Amino acid sequence: ETGVTQTPRHLVMGMTNKKSLKCEQHLGHNAMYWYKQSAKKPLELMFVYNFKEQTENNSVPSRFSPECPNSSHLFLHLHTLQPEDSALYLCASSQVFPGGTGELFFGEGSRLTVL
Amino acid sequence: DQQVKQNSPSLSVQEGRISILNCDYTNSMFDYFLWYKKYPAEGPTFLISISSIKDKNEDGRFTVFLNKSAKHLSLHIVPSQPGDSAVYFCAASFISSGSARQLTFGSGTQLTVLP
């Protein structure tokens, strides 16, 4: 396994379903991120976990619930989503240290469609 | 309000010619800038970066120029190749709380290199 892997790659769910996205990083990094990419919009930062502690919640609705059980795994639990939540959800990791560049390493994304 | 703007959603260039992708930013705190490249169905991958103490950084066919007074950076690809066809994201960061850096992304420019 290399880099950052995300599962599932594609997910279709109804508005009343509960599902989860999973991310695993094999880079030994200490920070993990969820980003949302909608068509023709900037990548939107959703959550940041630094040393397994959530350090950022970018005003994300509570129907998105992150979980970071350890520094290698990150989940995004989805519940009662709306059709406008359909997007590509990208997981990323980085090594945070003083003077670091903040370079992110991304997974391939999970394409979510909410019906 | 977008702090990082890529005003051209798309760009078409003939193979062998120069591709110039532009990015503007508004936050004068940004001191590190990155370009990411994204193919369909893949996550973004790091391409090249530049610190605010420099005005140019070169890596093979890719050169990034930074004009701090204009809050503008550009990515030059020469010569352009069909395999360069992808979406290019500009990103900027500064050190926030502690040692953490978080990237702010632009909306991307779709580059198409025509054979």
Image (cartoon, rainbow, N blue to C red):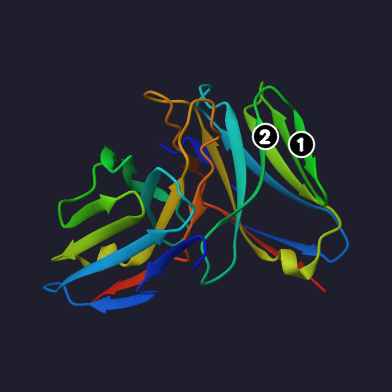
Q: Residue B57: which numbered mark, if any?
A: 1
Number of numbered discs: 2
Q: Which residue sits at x=31%, y=65%? A: A22
Could you say which is closer to the camera, residue A55 or residue A45? A55
Q: Relative to A15, is B20 above or below?
A: above
- Whether residue A110 is visible, yes or no, is no
Q: Earlier in the sequence, mark 1 or mark 2?
A: 2
CB-based contact (under 8 Å), mark 1 and mark 2: yes
Mark 2 element type: strand
Q: CA distance from mark 1 to mark 2?
A: 6 Å
Q: Relative to B60, is B34 above or below?
A: above
Q: Residue type at mark 2?
A: Ile
Q: Which residue sits at x=20%, y=65%? A: A82
> Looking at the rendering, in which quadrant would you find the C terminus of chain A?
bottom left
Q: Which residue sits at x=47%, y=41%? A: A95
Q: Quadrant location of residue A110?
A: bottom left
Instruction: Tell me residue A89's x, y (percent).
Output: 37, 61
Q: Quadrant location of residue A101?
A: top right
Q: Residue type at mark 1?
A: Asn
Q: Is residue A46 left or right of residue A64?
A: right
Instruction: Tell me residue A91's x, y (percent).
Output: 40, 57
Instruction: Tell me residue A37's x, y (percent).
Output: 41, 58
Q: Which residue sits at x=19%, y=54%? A: A65
Chain designation of label 2: B
